[in-house]
Amino acid sequence: FLTSQQDAVARDGGWSLTGRKLFVSGSEAADHLFLNARVEGGPAFFGVTIDDTVSFPPIDETMGMRATRSRTIVFDGTPLPAARRCGPPSPDYANLITVGFAFISLGIAESALDELTASAHRAKGGAMLADQQWVKHETGMAWAQVTAALLMAERTAWLADEKNPEAMAAATETKMLANEVAKSTAALALRVGGGGAYLVRSPIQRIVRDAQAGALMAYSVPFSQEVVGAAVLASGA
């Protein structure tokens, strides 16, 4: 989205776009889209109205996190009028997509905690896992990690509202942590849920799969780790 590799073709009054966009959450509900395509070798943003050149493959072809209905849009000669081309953002603008990414993983982590708690209170063999020491220990740490990541995400949003230049760096740090917390909390829910958590009817199996997606979305966790680690090490030089 931010560094499109999809070229728009020049036409009278602007350009047209043919291709697919992936990871577009809730797109079928929109009347208008904010779209980035490559024009003359560089990024260009356009306001696009949904028309008969835009279609949505069945939801079973979805990409990304199912909980957000993140799916594919197909463009077939969609017009991109020059009059609807947007100017570049101001230098102090914080990308709201990057700022908000962490909250998706945090929602998944909170769902994992809810299902973990429900599973732990179901009686198994006359006892409840909620009474087991290891479950208490690991649940306590998971809750603290989710809370810490949430506080980081709220701070990032505040920095963006204040147009603070540290907002984008904070967003990278926060996404990195929230992605990993979602994965570890979902894994704990799976352990507590046991064999039943693998069944299709269990919400835990979906949470575990959805938790993986955030870490793969740009910027991925490995890339974010490199960026954040380099910044920390440079600050001590």
Image (cartoon, helix red, strand yellow):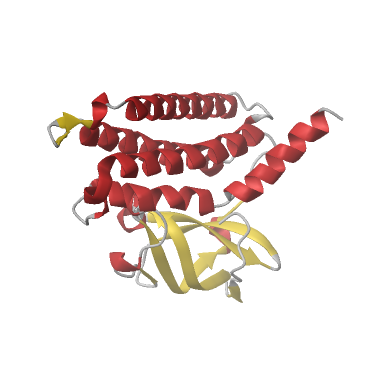
Which quadrant of the structure image shows residue 187?
Answer: top left
Please state which of residues 135 and 157 is positioned toward the viewer in this rendering.
135
Q: Is residue 46 above or below residue 137?
A: below
Query: Can see residue 107?
Result: yes
Query: Can see residue 88?
Result: no
Tell which residue pokes out farthest to the front in this image. Answer: 125
Q: Residue at x 26, y 42 (%)?
A: 193
Q: Is residue 148 above or below residue 58?
A: above
**From the image, which quarter does the C terminus lie in?**
top right
Total labels drawn: 0
Image position of 237 (left or right of 45): right
Please state which of residues 203 and 59 is positioned toward the viewer in this rendering.
203
**From the image, which quarter does the N terminus lie in?**
bottom right
- Residue 27 at what x, y percent from top left? 36, 56
Image position of 86 (left or right of 227): left
Tell which residue pokes out farthest to the right in this image. Answer: 237
Image position of 4 (left or right of 79): right
- Residue 139 at what x, y percent from top left? 37, 28
Q: Residue at x 67, y 34 (%)?
A: 92
Q: Residue at x 38, y 61 (%)?
A: 71
Please state which of residues 231 and 3 is positioned toward the viewer in this rendering.
231
